[in-house]
Amino acid sequence: MNPVAFIYLAVVLFSIGSAAVLLRRNAIVAFMGVELMLNAANLAFVGFSRIQGTVDGQVLAFFVMIVAAAEVVVGLAIVVAIFRARESISIDDPSELKG
Amino acid sequence: MFWVVATITVVPSFALLLARKAVHVAVSVVLVMIGLAVAYIMLAAPFLGMVQIVVYTGAVMMLFVFVLMLIGVSGKEDLTETLKGQRWIGVLVAAGIGFFLTGVISRVTLSVAEPTEGNPTEIAGALFGHMVVIVETLGFVLIVAAVGALVLTHQPRLVPKHTQRQIAEARVLVGADPVNKPMPGVYARHNALDVPALDPKGEPIDDSISRVLEVRHQTLDEAPYRADIEEGQPEE
């Protein structure tokens, strides 16, 4: 199978993930959209790694996974903390900082 | 095979936009992650495919499900638009990103190299060879993230913890009964959390029933059970 097709697949997944981030109000669902975008980027990395015939892309995708794991841990902790303070996980709710 | 992978990644990912319940979204994203793992293995990266399954479907998505469990699954999503026309702008921007990237990729010609082994040994050589400093930094990032999660979700104790002795002494001080309350129920004749216990004289002990049931008016009168017992007793 031509690896370039996987790059297009990554583009489609990235668009869907970004649409989820832009449209959904539930913080956790928006967060999963971010995860999908990260994974699409990973797929592109691995696809290009296959196209180039080197292993560097895979190593970078591995790094992205590690950072994504750390990000999920901290992000979900923030979601839990906000939920405890406000009983809500809507993204629009904590808008008191605006002028 | 590519089309199978494309189907099991793209179709469930639409749940991110359409599904109402966050749990359904989480399960669909698990499917997407499994599809991506298959894609990695097809792209001669079996190590990353395994890591994808372990880290994403095993750890990250289960963490999402745990948090959903923690903060309530029922959380309703408010669908009013705070910004006017945000929905269409969002769809437009996402589609724009998609078309832009597709355009960029379709313009370049990529000469595909011969398939390499892509085995874990090669990755290990790169990771612990010239990228070892990055690996150690990322280990540090993970530790900081773990500590950060603990700090963010930690709730400081507002009042000092009471020992059992202090609780007992406080009970005596207000003149309450220092011993435990009797259990509810009449001689196991009835599944009787809702029937008061009887004291040796045969009088009901109102304290033995949970106050919650009393407030809800879910208690039963003890009289029929008592009569039942007394009837069953042999004549003296």
Image: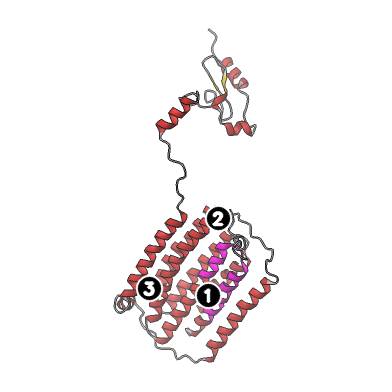
Please state the extent of the stretch shown in magenta in the rendering. A8-35
Q: Is residue B144 left or right of residue A35?
A: left
Residue A31 lies in the magenta-colored region: yes
Mark 3 vs mark 1: which is more N-terminal?
A: 1
Q: Amino acid at mark 1?
A: Val
Q: Main secondary structure of the magenta part?
A: helix
Mark 1 Cα within 10 Å, few/some/many (few <14, many 20+)? few
How much space separates mark 2 and mark 3, taking CA atoms? 37 Å
How much space separates mark 3 and mark 1, taking CA atoms? 21 Å
Mark 2 Cα within 10 Å, few/some/many (few <14, many 20+)? some
Q: Which residue is under mark 1?
A: B4
Q: Can the viewer see residue B191 in this picture?
A: no
Residue nearer the viewer, A43 or A28: A28
Q: Which disc is residue A83 wearing?
A: 2
Question: Residue B84 location in percent, x, y?
Answer: 70, 70
Mark 3 Cα within 10 Å, few/some/many (few <14, many 20+)? some
Q: Is residue B123 left or right of residue A93?
A: left
Q: Which residue is under mark 3?
A: B47
Count of marks, rendered view: 3
Comparing marks 2 and 3, which lies closer to the viewer? 2
Name which quarter of the figure residue B138 lies in: bottom left
Q: Amino acid at mark 3?
A: Phe
How much space separates mark 2 and mark 1, taking CA atoms? 39 Å
